[in-house]
Every structure is written in structure tokens, then in C-alpha cells.
Amino acid sequence: MSHRRRSPAAAVSDRAVRGLMKLGAEWLPFADAATAELPLGRLLRLGLFQVSVGMAATLLAGTLNRVMIVELGVPAGVVALMLSLPLAFAPLRALIGHRSDVYRSVLGWKRVPFVWYGTMLQFGGLAILPFSLILLAGERHGQRVTGMIGAAVAFLLVGAGAHTTQTAGIALATDLANERSRPRVVALLYVMLLAGTALSALAFGQLLGDFSNTRLVQVVQGSAVVTMVLNLCALWKQEPRTHVPQPGDDERRPGFRETWRAFAGDRRAKRLLVAVGLGAAGFGMQDALLEPYGGQVLHLSVGATTQLTALMAAGALAAFALSARLLSRGGDAARLAGYGMLGGVVGFSAVVFASPLGSAALFRAGTVLIGFGGGMFSVGTLTCAMGMDRRAGSGLAVGAWGSVQATCAGIAVGLGGVLRDGVAHLAARGALGPALQGTAASYGFVYHLEIGMLFLALAVAGPLAAPRRARTASSPAPFGLAELPG
């Protein structure tokens, strides 16, 4: 059989493809996250549960937040209360993680059932939500009250499902990834969450461009179906069937209190959780204030302040990529989290100085740094949690991290708004003196408080970082502010 001679163009194309493949392994941030046990295709498919969580967050906190207040006329306080309802479920993430550590289904799975339960909760909440919105659009008072109650239940179900799915899903990724690739897997899962948030925001904006109540119901129902499909694809053939439960197994399983007592008794685990709480509050307090600050203090347009979300996301994405690269080269996760907190301090400082300098460019640069620091902090602390003593169970460690992070960030968002309003009231009355009478004073107070909380988090997290000359988990050394006397 004669072989056709390849054209010079085809030969050049083949060489270019081979060159890009070599370049990818060296430069692409997540090309080396895959292993023989967890190929890249399987890893990307597993990360689809993060896409569904990001879509749910965008739908509730972004699209429906605006629609319920503007189009449906629901009071902003009621909507804010609904958005805070998922926070009530966040402290249970540690229990969910522990249950997924010790649970064995009749098919030999332990993580898959919990991801499935979370998926069903998300689907149920999104299934209830359209009927609640229909009642909210009604003119009768009884209809609107019933609609508000239904919407609150739907928000709670979606939030509970997202917490359950994310906790068990990350624990499953911890089980499947080996210790060397685990940091890169963490960063990739964060990118999938960010991608789900961004893509769903674009899709919702496009679908609801010509707004109507019918179109809104269709979008919510479609989101429920997409959530189910994404999570089913994520779970398909991921967790191997291991031990099928036998009679008497329940007596050999440690209880949650016993396991939690052992986990919380570890000084490193306790220090990590305190640092996570302080850092999450330090980064999260500005969530509801950054865009109003740009509009009221720097007099930016609505379009300009809307771009801040994209700038912060770009900073976070850069942090995920850099974190994966540094950790893959043996970087210390606790030290990486410290760099993220320092980046946040610089970012908040830039935002504060943007007011007296009247510099929108400095404000935007600070926003990027806040997103960058928050992303690096999240990857670093979650990697630390995933690397904790495995006797307690990776699900418990990941659940405890998520519980503290979500709870403290949620409380900080509400506290930031309250403090801003309180300081603005005092400044308007002149109670703070002539130097603190402008609008910027109330925002500046919150930003300075966030800087202080990040410094506290640095001091707490310091001993978790190993020294550069001997980075081992058994030899913690001072780091950052912890090196200072006292």
C-alpha cells in the first residue's frame, strides 16, 4: 500500500501542535493538575459541581436580587433577609463533611450520596422558586405574603443544597487527588466556580434582556434542569465502590462529637480555622460597599462601577493560576495564604488612598489586588485544610473550613453595611470631628477595619508556615507578624 506524502503545511501544523502541547505542560496553570489516576478530562468533569454552585449563587444574589427589588417591588430588607438564609446552613458543613467521611451506602459509596442529596435540594428550591415569583407578581396582599414565604423556603433549600454539594464534592476531589497534585486541583476547582459564576451571569443577562415574568420563570426552571445535568455528569463514574456495609459497622464508626473534639484539639487545625475566620471577614466586609464607594466618593458611573466585579474576578483568576504554579513547585500553602492577606492589605490601602487622591485608576488597581489577595488566601487555606491529619477525615476538615469561611464572610457583609451607616450618621452630626465629616469617612472606617483584621489573621496564621529552609508539616515556624515580640 502506498502512503500519500504529507504536505509541508501539514508537517508545520503537526510541529506547531506538538509545540503547544509541550508549552501547555510548562506554562498552562492547570495542565499538570491531572495524574494517571485522575486524568484532566475526568477532573474537569468532576469540577462541574462547582459550575452549578456558581450558577446558583449568581441566580440568587445577582439576578433575582435585582428582579425582586426593582421589577417585583419586594422591599430590599426582605430580599436581604432571604439572601442571608443560606448562611444559616453554613455551620452544618463540618457535620456534612464528617458524615460523608464515615457514611457507606449499600452500593459502597460515601461521597456520591451527599452530592446527590445536595443536588436534589438545589433542584427542589429552584422548582419552588418560579411559583413563588408568580405569587410575588400578584396584586393581592395574601398572594405576595405567600410568595415571600415560598421564596424564602426556596432560597434556603438552594443554599443548603449548594453547601452540601460543595462540601462533599471537594472532599471527593481530595480523595481522588494524590498529595502532590492536590493544590493544583484546589485551584482548578476555584476556577470552575468562577467560570460558572461568570458564564451564568452572561447567560442570564442575555436571556433576560427582554424581561417578562414568563421569561424569568423559564430561566429559573432551566437553571434547575441544568443543575441536575451538570451534577450528574460530575458524579458519573467518579467515586469507586469500596466497602459495602455489613451488620455491626455502625458501632465501629466514630461519632461527630468524638471526631470533632479530636480535630479541634489539634492546635494547627484550631489556628487555621481562626485565621480563616478573620481573613474571610477581612476580605468579605467590602462586598456590599465597593461599588457604592466608587459611585458616591469617586463619582464613577454605573457602568464603571459594574466593571469592578470583572476586575476583582480577573485578580482572583490570576491568583488561582499563580497559586497552582507555586504550590506545584513545592510552595508552602500557609505562606501562600499569608501572601494573599498581604495583597489584600495593599489593595485596601490603595482603595482608601484613592479618595484623597481622587484617582479612579488607583481604586481599580486596589480592586484587582483585593480579588488577587482573596483568591490566593482561599486557595492557600483550603489547601492547608485538605492537608490536615487524615485521621479526622478530609470531609470534616473541608467542611470545617467551608463552615467558618462562609459564616464569617456572611456576617462580615452585614456588619460592614451596619458600620458604614452608623459611622456615616455620626459623621453627618459632626460627632467624629472636622476631619471625618465627608462621605468617604464611613467607607474608610470599614476598610481600615478590614486591614486590621487581615493583620490579625496574618499573626494567627504565622506559625502554620514552615521555614524556607525546612518546609515540613511537623516543624512550624514563625511567619509575618508572628515574628514580632509579644
Image (cartoon, grey):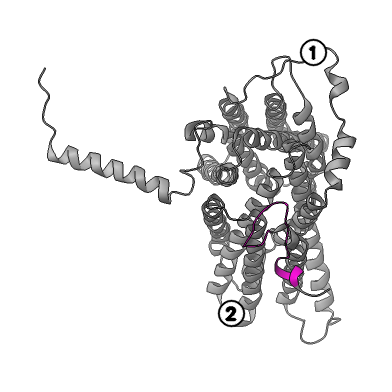
Residue 90 rendering spot, x and y as whole percentages: 78, 42
N-term mark: 2 or 1:
1
Q: Examine the image and state in which quarter residue 263 appears.
A: top right
Tell me, yes or no, if residue 139 can be seen here: no
Q: For mark 2, does the 10 Å Cα neighbourhood hold few (<14), some (14 to 19), or many (20 or more) residues?
A: few
Which residue does the numbered mark 1 point to in the structure image? 246
Q: Is residue 343 left or right of residue 37?
A: right
Tell me, yes or no, if residue 274 can be seen here: yes
Q: Is residue 133 above or below residue 463?
A: above
Q: Is residue 471 magenta?
A: yes
Which residues are drawn in magenta? 466-483
Q: Quadrant of the N terminus?
A: top left
Residue 274 rendering spot, x and y as whole percentages: 80, 55
Q: Main secondary structure of the magenta part?
A: loop
**Real-space Cα separation, disc 2 to disc 1, in angstroms:** 69 Å
Residue at 81% x, 72% y is 423
Q: Amino acid at mark 2?
A: Gly
Q: For mark 1, does the 10 Å Cα neighbourhood hold few (<14), some (14 to 19), or many (20 or more) residues?
A: few
Q: Nearer the viewer, residue 75 or 483?
A: 483
Q: Amino acid at mark 1?
A: Gln
Extreme-bottom residue of the structure: 434
Residue at 67% x, 42% y is 60
Q: Examine the image and state in which quarter residue 221 appears.
A: top right
Residue at 62% x, 66% y is 343
Residue 413 rendering spot, x and y as whole percentages: 75, 57
Q: Is residue 186 magenta?
A: no
The residue mark sitting in front, 2 or 1, is 1
Q: Nearer the viewer, residue 61 or 373?
A: 373
Which residue does the numbered mark 2 point to in the structure image? 358
Helix, strand or loop for disc 1 = loop
Residue 49 rendering spot, x and y as whole percentages: 61, 34
Q: Is residue 49 left or right of residue 82?
A: left
